[in-house]
Image (tube, rainbow, N blue to C red):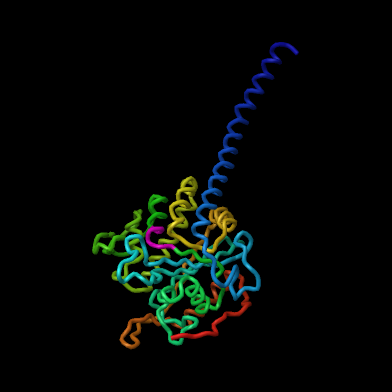
Amino acid sequence: MDRQQMRKKKQKKRRIKFIVFPLILILLGTVGFGSYLTYKLANASSKAQETLSRGEKSNLRLNAIDPGKDNFSVLIAGIDDSKHRKGKKGFEGNRTDALILATFNRERKSVKMVSIPRDSYVQIPGRINKDKITHAHAYGGIDLTVDTVEHLFNLPVDYYVRVNFDAFLQIVDTLGGVDVDVKKKIVEQDSQDRPKAITIEPGKQRLNPEEALAYARTRHADSDIMRGDRQKQIVEAIIKESTQIKSIPKYGQLIENVGDNMSTNFTLGNMIALLKYAKSINNIESLSLKGSDARINNIYYYSLDEQSVLDVSNKLKEHLDYSGTGTTDTNSTTN
């Protein structure tokens, strides 16, 4: 082999090294980040893990659902609680400030979600009289809240995620805000309950954590139904923001931040599967419940239209590919 051939061979080796080394570094970085996320998820899941008293599956399912393989449903419950409110009079029995039921279809890579107005007049399992759905959590925690939503729509709630105000603020803060098209001016208290501390003008804009919370929780700008629509807007904005490539490096911090202010029956394996699934979601559809204002014994309720509840239920069942199996356990009743 002459000198020229040897020189070419050495140059080829250098080119190979130049290409291979960065690929190895990228691979190691990816594996390292994956391990880092798994570590963070393991810590967060140990803090946040709270199984339901029913066990690993809904009574409306014959078998447990694996979000890594199956269509599934999630109840997102926002609790009117925070460090600021803990121990203060009037906040002893936490109610749900937001209830959003979402169904995920793996084949279609789509999500459907419906917000349930907090004052909806519903039958809470185990109680004789109908009541506001927000009170289910005060009466029986997340277990009774899940049971009530299953009873309302006659479909399984496979998983739940319960967050308080602090977790919500931390999520939006870690993501660097969320993009929302604000329909009308909002004037609302902040997370410290200071009145009229937040003002949001109409138009497309990026909301910071306090603004996003005010936008989602205000009850004075319009109706309870519109409030639910705003909450779905925020959830959709969070999903879209979190699935962008620029947000991936933030997952570790995001997981760490919400661990103390969130509870869920998702396992570590479920969470890892969801990280992969979230990136492929390409369609989010919002459904709405119809109804009317009502006063019963001089107390305000939102009376749901039965046909609207049935229509929404059927759409969610179809999206889940759920035909209806299992039974609900609502034998005992109390006042």
- Indicate whether 272 appears above or below 30: below
Q: What percent of the width, then of the height, locates residue 129?
A: 43, 86
Instruction: Please report the bounds of the magenta region as a residue range.
Output: 163-168
Confirm whether residue 185 shows in the render.
no
Confirm whether residue 204 shows in the render.
yes
Query: Residue 280 magenta-drawn?
Result: no
Query: Along the horizontal axis of the image, is 118 left or right of 248?
Result: left
Q: What percent of the width, then of the height, locates residue 312?
A: 50, 75
Kindly indicate the quadrant of the structure image that contains residue 19: top right
Query: Residue 166 magenta-drawn?
Result: yes
Q: What percent of the width, then of the height, locates residue 119?
A: 38, 77
For the point 57% across and 45% down, which residue is it? 35
Total labels drawn = 0
Kindly indicate the quadrant of the structure image that contains residue 212: bottom left
Kindly indicate the quadrant of the structure image that contains residue 270: bottom right
Q: Quadrant of the C terminus?
A: bottom left
Q: What percent of the width, then of the height, locates residue 89?
A: 30, 70
- Indicate whether 118 appears above or below 14: below
**Considering depth in this image, is 106 or 155 the residue closer to the camera?**
155
For the point 69% across and 13% down, which residue is it? 4
For the point 45% across and 60% down, which residue is it? 262
- Indicate whether 80 appears above or below 167: below
Query: Along the horizontal axis of the image, is 219 left or right of 100?
Result: left
Q: Quadrant of the N terminus?
A: top right
Q: Residue furthest front?
A: 87
For the point 70% across and 15% down, which residue is it? 6
- What's the magenta bit mostly, secondary-structure-wise? helix
- Indicate whether 301 appears above or below 69: below
